[in-house]
Each structure stands twice: as C-alpha cells, then as structure tokens.
Image: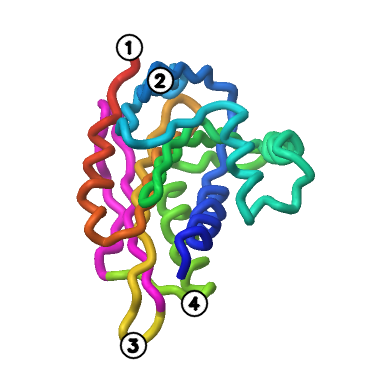
Amino acid sequence: MKKVFLSVLLFGTLLLSGCSGNSEIVADGNRVTIPDAGISFDFPENLSVTTGDSIYEALHSGMSFSGYASADELKKSMEEDGTRYLAQGTREDIMVIITAQDMTPEEDTEQVTLSDYARRVHDTSIFEYYASGYRTTDKTSLSEATYGGKSGWLSFFELTTAEDEPQYLSGNAEFMFQQGADIYSVQICFFESDDADEALKLFDNISAAD
C-alpha cells in the first residue's frame, strides 16, 4: 500500500479527536509552544513544521479533503464542527500532529472523562481500520503515561494487511492529556516498524511551557 493512501487514513483517524479552541501558538524554530495547553514541543530538526492556516492548506491538498473548494472552506467547516489543528511536523516517514478537543458537555449530557475519551479514540480508530480490511499487531495498547509533567493516556497500535503473510503498513502513537476543559493530543504516525522506538521517544520532547 502506498504511504500516501495510509496518510489519508491517518488524517481520517485524527478527525475522531477533533480539536477546538483558540490557543495562541508560538513557534520558535522547531519549538512550538501552546500556552493554553501548558506545553512546548520540540519537533526534530529534520521535520517540516507547520502551524496556523498553513495546516489547512496542507490538509486541503491531500486526497481526503479534495471535496472542499479551498483551504478556507475546509477550515470554516471544521470550525463549525468545533475542530481545529494546532501544529504538525512531517517528513517522508513520520508525522507529528498536535490537536485539542473542547470537552465542555452539551446541555443535558454528562462530562466525558479523559480515560473514557482516550478509550473511545483508541477503540474507534482500530475498529475503523479493521472495517477497512486492515489488522493490528500484538503490540496494541492503551496505558497511563506522563510526559512534560502532564498525566494522561498513551494509545499505541501498528497496522498490517490481512493476508496470511501480513505486510507492515504504519504505526500510531498518541498521547492525550487534559488541561482545563480541553483534551490535547500529540499524535505520531510512522511507516516503518523499526521507527516505533524513535516515535515513542519523541514524547520526551514534550515539556512544560515557559
């Protein structure tokens, strides 16, 4: 399977944890600070870092959002649904995407806890890949984790084809934590099995905002 197609599927997964809010993003070289989240993230020097409206330009140029007339239309549609992308870093074999989700409950609905939210994102992502004909390895997990002084949940799974001799497709690691009414996500997508350890080490690049 081509990596481009897998990227489309992964962007679809990101929409499960749609993001909202108006966090001011401060970019200094490859360090991105999100004051509302209380964190900074140091993207590796060999990643191309994007914030603000440029993210929507990148999303619109992808196959999965070709139905929108422009990046502005895509952004407007997402904001109307309460979603927002905050920052992303990419290279050929890895993507890092930071998002936020407003968890303020609607009227007559219960507050969703961070643990319930993380479980829903983890399980729903895997279910949708299975429904699309893919499978996961035995390394799938959802566990509590702490990075940059933030306690949260770490979702991890790797995708393969469903043949008798499965082909490795991609891996996904996502750290979710809560700050006020928002749940933030730092998601890392990689495309080679040997990159799993490197991807997980990137969560150590999360630090408390200055």
Q: Coloring scheme of the render?
A: rainbow
Q: Position of residue 2 (x, y in %)?
A: 47, 66
Q: CA distance from mark 4 to mark 2?
A: 38 Å
Q: Which residue is mark 3?
A: 164
Mark-to-mark CA distance, 4 and 3: 13 Å
Residue 158 higher or lower than 103, as above or below: below
Q: Which residue is mark 2?
A: 33
The boundaries of the magenta stretch are: 138-161
Q: Amino acid at mark 2?
A: Thr
Residue 156 percent across, percent down from the top left = 32, 55
For the point 30% across and 60% down, the residue is: 192
In front of the other: 61 or 190: 61
Sequence order check, earlier mark of 4 and 3: 4
User: Tag on residue 210?
Assistant: 1
User: Residue shown at 46%/36% (left/top)?
Assistant: 88
Choose between 179 and 47: the one closer to the eye: 47
Q: Quadrant of residue 31?
A: top left
Residue 172: mark: none
Q: For the residues marked 1 and 4, what is the alpha-carbon distance in whole angstroms?
A: 44 Å
Q: Position of residue 51 (x, y in %)?
A: 52, 28
The reply to whether the C-beta atoms of the residues labelled 4 and 2 are less than 8 Å apart is: no
Earlier-in-chain disc, 1 versus 4: 4
60 in the magenta segment: no
Residue type of the residue flagged with mark 1: Asp
The answer, for residue 184, to whether it is visible in the render is yes
Whichever of labels 4 and 2 marks the residue nearer the N terminus, that label is 2
